[in-house]
Amino acid sequence: MQNDINEEKQQMSFLDHLEELRWHIIRSFLAILIFAALAFVFKTFLFDVIIMGPSRPDFFTNRVLCTLAESLDIPILCINQEQLLFQNIRMAGQFTMHIWISFIAGAVVAFPYIFWEFWRFIRPALYENEVKHSRGAIFSASILFSLGILFAYFIITPLSVYFLGNYQVSESVENIINFGSYVSTISSIVLASGIMFELPVFIFFLSKVGLVTAEFLRKYRKHAIVIVLGLAAVITPPDMISQIMVCLPLLILYEAGIIIAKRVEKKREKFLAEQ
């Protein structure tokens, strides 16, 4: 009889956790919808300034590279000086893309709040000492995600647009790019970079639960380099310069993750020694 009561309490506790998780997810989704609605309203800024920006000659990165090209006398640095041609081949293509990009923009802007909801859900499972040393997690995750977004948007995206938009297998084949393909390429590169820049945060939480250690990360550093090269090859055009520019910050973040894992281990050892 007592066992049945204990099982019922455990089941209620599990169901309570599921209910709590459900509300965290609902609130996160509502935040995305609110920001997505705002993005949908400001269509001109979202598409003409943000989405189409890297393809225009007056984009910040394109202007900086052209200035460098003139001062260093390296004409190849001046990229995206001819406006690409886009076309829509589906009846509802532009409207569907408008909704989809608004949703992505809402998720990007709402990321700090989403991570805060995630943090509120897992916080009760942490010790008081762990909560104390993890207070900057939300700020750090938000900063890293923003840096990844900005890095991809201002560095990787212009290079990708230039390479893929101007690549030709034959002079008789003209590049008239499907607008949906262009938007999908831009959004996938930016989102992938933002997520990959969260590597130190992932390592922090994995080291907290004991799934990875600093020694483990050092041991498999070579394997990590191969994985990073593979990821860089996926989200960048197939040229060496773009891949190196993506690999370098990821490798730096990996090394930062090793330092973070080491600090987590030291704090855990100190906490256990004080018990």
Image (cartoon, rainbow, N blue to C red):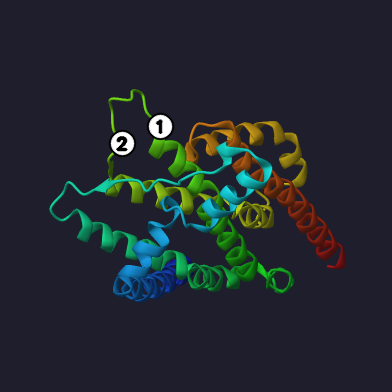
x, y percentage for residue 52? 38, 56
Mark 1 or 2, nearer chain start:
1
SS type, badge 2 = loop
Relative to the observer, which residue lies in front, 137 or 241? Answer: 241
133 in relation to 96, above or below = below
Residue 175's mark? 2
Amino acid type indicated by mark 2: Asn
Residue in view at x 46 percent, y 48 percent: 189
172 in relation to 127, above or below = above
Q: In the shown orientation, is residue 94 left or right of residue 70?
A: left
Q: Hey, which quadrant is residue 122 in on the image? A: bottom right
- Tag 1 near tag 2, CB within 8 Å: yes
Residue projecting furthest to the left: 91
x, y percentage for residue 110? 45, 70
Residue in view at x 37 percent, y 69 percent: 45
Q: Is residue 41 visible?
A: yes
Amino acid type indicated by mark 1: Tyr
Relative to the observer, which residue lies in front, 154 or 268? Answer: 154
Residue in view at x 28 percent, y 25 percent: 172
Residue in view at x 59 percent, y 73 percent: 124
x, y percentage for residue 5? 45, 71
Residue 134's mark? none
SS type, badge 1 = loop
Quarter of the image with the C terminus is bottom right
- Residue identified by numbered label 1: 167
Label 2, residues with CA under 10 Å away: few <14, some 14-19, many ≥20:
some
Relative to the observer, which residue lies in front, 130 or 59? Answer: 59
Q: In the shown orientation, is residue 107 left or right of residue 155?
A: left
Quarter of the image with the N terminus is bottom left
Q: Is residue 242 visible?
A: no
